[in-house]
Image (cartoon, rainbow, N blue to C red):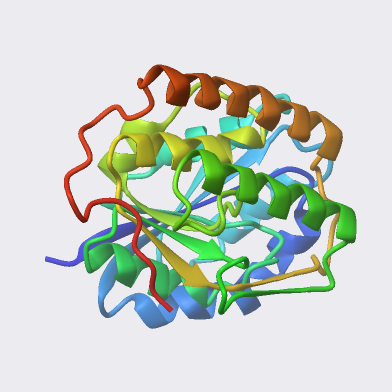
Amino acid sequence: MKQRISIVMPACNEEEALRLLPARLFPVLEAMQDAYELELVLVDDGSSDATFVEMERLRDSSPPFPIVLGVHPVNRGLGAALRTGSDLATGQIIVWLDADGTYPFSLVESLVEAVERGADVATASPYHPQGGVEGVPAFRLLFSRGASTLYRMLVDYRVNTWTAMVRAWRADVLRSASTDEDGFLYVAMTLVEARRRGARIVEAPAVLARRQVGVSKAKVWRITKAHLRYMRGLARLRLTGKFWLREQPSGAGALQHG
């Protein structure tokens, strides 16, 4: 029996990006169909443009895999949209993808294969020694790279990137690590909480690029404050010896692959 893979894609005011999916994402998924049973889960997070109309058009265009739609009547945040999409997903492996395509969609298959080889989480990693960044504004990199550096210090130095949303998860691992955080912090928080529970993390070197269409929804200062609050809590757990939620056997934890 084929393994079922759920591709979860949240979107807020991404009608332009969604119009590009048949040309950019669908060929990647079609090439995977011989090996996997696929579904695409699209979540409209309170968009004010035609995002949901585009989602309906994609669903009704007779794609070669089912498309499941979720919608938030009002904007609730990236974390809430990822949680809604993941709750709708029926796959044994759940892949999170950005609608804007700032990471190449071709990563999907390699992330899924990493989980099949034994990882609990496989994450795109621009800060891996073999990864890279192209054309991304300096202020965004300062936040993202800085946050990842601090998480390396607090959690696991072997994981270079903690803030990239594009990941493949074993579904049970994701559900055990999920929290009620609604904002961008959810992305890093789920990876941290998975690691605290002993999850094995693989990084796939990737190139993070400037988005080609649409506008970023990230409010950098607000997101930075949320990360710092969370990090303070992690630091306290380290100091009190309560950080790990599961005993860490020898050799367990983060893995690297290039």
Q: Count the labels in the image.
A: 0
Residue 115, picture quadrant: bottom left
Residue 255, picture quadrant: bottom left
Name which residue lies at 17% across and 45% down. Answer: 249
**Quadrant including the N terminus:** bottom left
Q: Is residue 24 above or below residue 5?
A: below
Residue 30 is situated, as x and y percent measured from the top left of the image, at: 42, 78
Relative side of 17 to 72, left or right: right
Q: Nearer the viewer, residue 16 or 127?
A: 127
Spot the residue most to the front: 239
Relative side of 101 to 169, left or right: right
Name which residue lies at 22% across and 69% down. Answer: 117
Tell me if residue 84 can be seen.
Answer: yes
**Quadrant including the C terminus:** bottom left
Name which residue lies at 69% across and 28% down. Answer: 228
Name which residue lies at 74% across and 62% down. Answer: 17
Relative side of 249 to 196, left or right: left
Residue 92 is situated, as x and y percent measured from the top left of the image, at: 25, 51
Residue 183 is situated, as x and y percent measured from the top left of the image, at: 66, 30
Q: Is residue 242 above or below residue 195?
A: above
Q: Nearer the viewer, residue 47 or 207?
A: 207
Q: Nearer the viewer, residue 238 or 38?
A: 238
Tell me if residue 70 can be seen.
Answer: no
Relative side of 103 to 3, left or right: right
Residue 253 is situated, as x and y percent measured from the top left of the image, at: 30, 51
